[in-house]
Image (spheres, grey):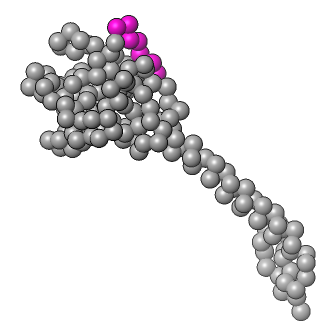
Amino acid sequence: MTQTRSLGPEPVREGGNAGIVPRMQAHRFLTGLLALALAVSPAVAAAPAQMIVPADFSIDADAPPTLAIRTSPQNLPVYVFDDDTPGKSACGAGCIGAWTPVVAGGGAKPLGDWTVIDREDGRKQWAYKGRPLYTFFTDTPGKPTGDGQEGKWHLFQP
């Protein structure tokens, strides 16, 4: 006696070859799905490399996301400050010595999520989605030292 079990629209008969076609279709479908997932995952991981950035920044596609966006030409890590409000820097005279605003070059214009804000000292500063951006005084290219300072400073990640 032949037993049947359902694997889709057609029954699969054990002991015969009637179930080979549905199994092959299921296998092809799952293989295709896996290939699609593998093809998409590198694109997602490389998203910062495909991002358009203003001329004052550069992208290191091989760096982790928190170090992918850097100032240019200094190649320094970029930070955000929790006390800032959208479009306004809270880093005044007391913190400017350690935290340097990423100053927007002359003629800098917004580019997508990148904006230019006016600081109280009259300078223009780059912001991302309204968050002002900074560098830290002891950082060197690719070596951040300010992440987590005072529990309020964090490496920038788009």
Rendered location of residue 19, percent (x, y): 86, 74
| Residue 134 visible | yes
Residue 57 horizontal side relative to residue 42, left or right? left
Residue 137 horizontal side relative to residue 143, left or right? left
Quadrant of the frame with the C terminus: top left
- The residue lying at 71 percent from left, 61 percent from top is 30
Quadrant in the picture for residue 11: bottom right
Q: Is the magenta stretch mostly helix, strand or loop?
A: loop
- The residue lying at 13 percent from left, 25 percent from top is 97
Q: Which of 88 and 10 is in front in this view?
A: 88
Rendered location of residue 61, percent (x, y): 48, 38
Q: Nearer the viewer, residue 129 or 42?
A: 42
Question: Is residue 111 covered in magenta?
Answer: yes
| Residue 85 visible | no
- The residue lying at 17 percent from left, 41 percent from top is 149
Residue 70 horizontal side relative to residue 119, left or right? right
Q: Residue furthest top?
A: 107
- The residue lying at 32 percent from left, 35 percent from top is 141
Residue range of the region highlighted in magenta in the rendering: 106-112
Relative vertical location of residue 135 with respect to residue 88 in this rendering, above or below: below
